[in-house]
Amino acid sequence: MHNREASPYISCVVPAYNEADNIAEFIKTLHQQLAQLSDRFEIIVVDDCSSDHTAATVLAIADQYRVKLMSFSRNFGKEIALSAGLDHAAGDVVVMIDADFQHPVEVIPEFLAQWRTGYDMVYGAQKTRAYMSPLRRTSSESFYYLMSKLSKIKLQADAGDFRLMDRKVVDALKAMPERNRFMKGLYAWVGFKTIGVPYDVHPRHAGTSRFNLRSLTSLALSGIVSFSTIPLRIWGLIGFIVASISLCYALFIVTRTLIFGTDLPGWATLVVAVTFLGGLQLLSVGILGEYIGSIFNEVKQRPRYLIAHKHGFSDTPTSH
C-alpha cells in the first residue's frame, strides 16, 4: 500500500535555449496547470546561455509565477541543463518538461495520478514520431535498435526527457558523478518502478528545434560509450579473427614456398591486404579513442556546469 501525499511539493525543471518567443506563455500555462494540482510548487528554468532574451523574459515574470532561474556561463547542452535542474530541485516529485509546448502540460495530472498509485518514475510515451523528418526518425530507430543490442539496459524508444520522478529517483540520479551525461540511459539505469503515459507531441509554439544531425550523432555516441563496452569486444574479436587468418595464410605461403619454390610476387594481393588492414586498424583506433576521450573528460574532474547568475534560489554553489 502506498501512502503518498495528495498535494506534494512539485518541482518543474525547464531547460531553455533561445526560447524567448515561447518561454513567457509557456510559464504562464505551466503555472496555471500546477496551481490546480498543488499549493506547493516551483518552476526552475535553466537557461543554457541563450543568445536571445530568454533570461530577461523569465526575470520579468519570475516573481509573478514562482519561477527560479539559473543561467549558465556558456552553453553546456541540454543533458547538463537537466542535471543542473535536478541538482537544485527541492520537490517531492520533479517534472522534466521542454519550453516549446511540444510536451503538453495537460499530461502532468496523469503523471501525478500514476505516482500516487506507487510508480516512482512516470514517462511520457510518444504515440507517434510523425513530427520528425524521415532521416531523423530512421536515425532514431536505428540508434534504439543498436542500443538494445549493445547494452544491458533497456531504453524506451518512445520515451524522451518528459517525465515525473519521485524524490528517491532524483537523489539516485544526483549521486551519479559522470560528466558525460546521457540522461535517457541514466533514467533506465537507475531502475525503480516505471510506467509510460501515452501523449501526442504538439507542434512547437514558435521557433525551430536546435537539435541537428551533428548534435544527435554526438549524443548517440555518448550514449553508446557510456553504457556499452561491446564495441571494444567486437573489435577485439575481429582482431583475433584477422590475426588467425593471417597466421594460417602465412603458414600456407611458407609451406608452398618450401615445396614449390618462390613464384612471382602478388602485388595486387599485397596492396589490398595492406590497405584493408590499415583501414581496419584506423577504425579500431578511432573506436578506442572514443572511450579514451570519455575517460579523459571524466578524470579531469571539471565541474559539469558553471552558473553565471541565479534568481530565486537561496545561497547554493555556482558550479557542480
Image: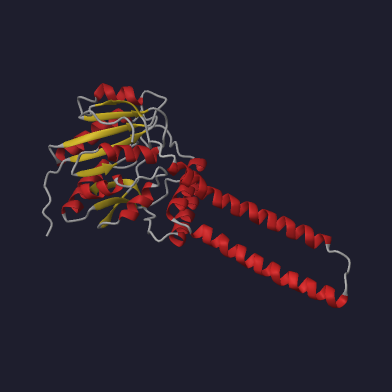
Is residue 21 rendered to the left or right of residue 290?
A: left
Image coordinates for residue 273, horizontal then vertical, percent: 74, 60
Residue 133 appears in view: no
Residue 287 appears in view: yes
Image coordinates for residue 60, horizontal then vertical, percent: 27, 21
Toward which corner of the image does residue 92 lie, by quadrant? top left
Is residue 246 rendered to the left or right of residue 25?
A: right
Residue closest to the eye, 210 or 72: 72
Toward which corner of the image does residue 35 lie, by quadrant? top left
The coloring applied to the image is secondary structure
Residue closest to the eye, 272 or 300: 300
Image coordinates for residue 5, horizontal then vertical, percent: 11, 48
- Above-or-below relation of 27 to 91: above
Image coordinates for residue 133, horizontal then vertical, percent: 48, 46
If the image is split into quadrants, where does the N terminus sit? bottom left
Is residue 283 rendered to the left or right of residue 253?
A: left
- Above-or-below relation of 232 to 167: below
If the image is split into quadrants, where does the C terminus sit? top left
Toward which corner of the image does residue 47 lie, by quadrant? top left
Q: Residue at horizontal 79%, vertical 71%?
A: 253
Q: Residue at horizontal 47%, vertical 57%?
A: 229
Is residue 3 rendered to the left or right of residue 211?
A: left
Residue closest to the eye, 155 or 221: 221
Q: Residue at horizontal 46%, vertical 60%?
A: 150
- Above-or-below relation of 238 to 22: below
Tag count: 0
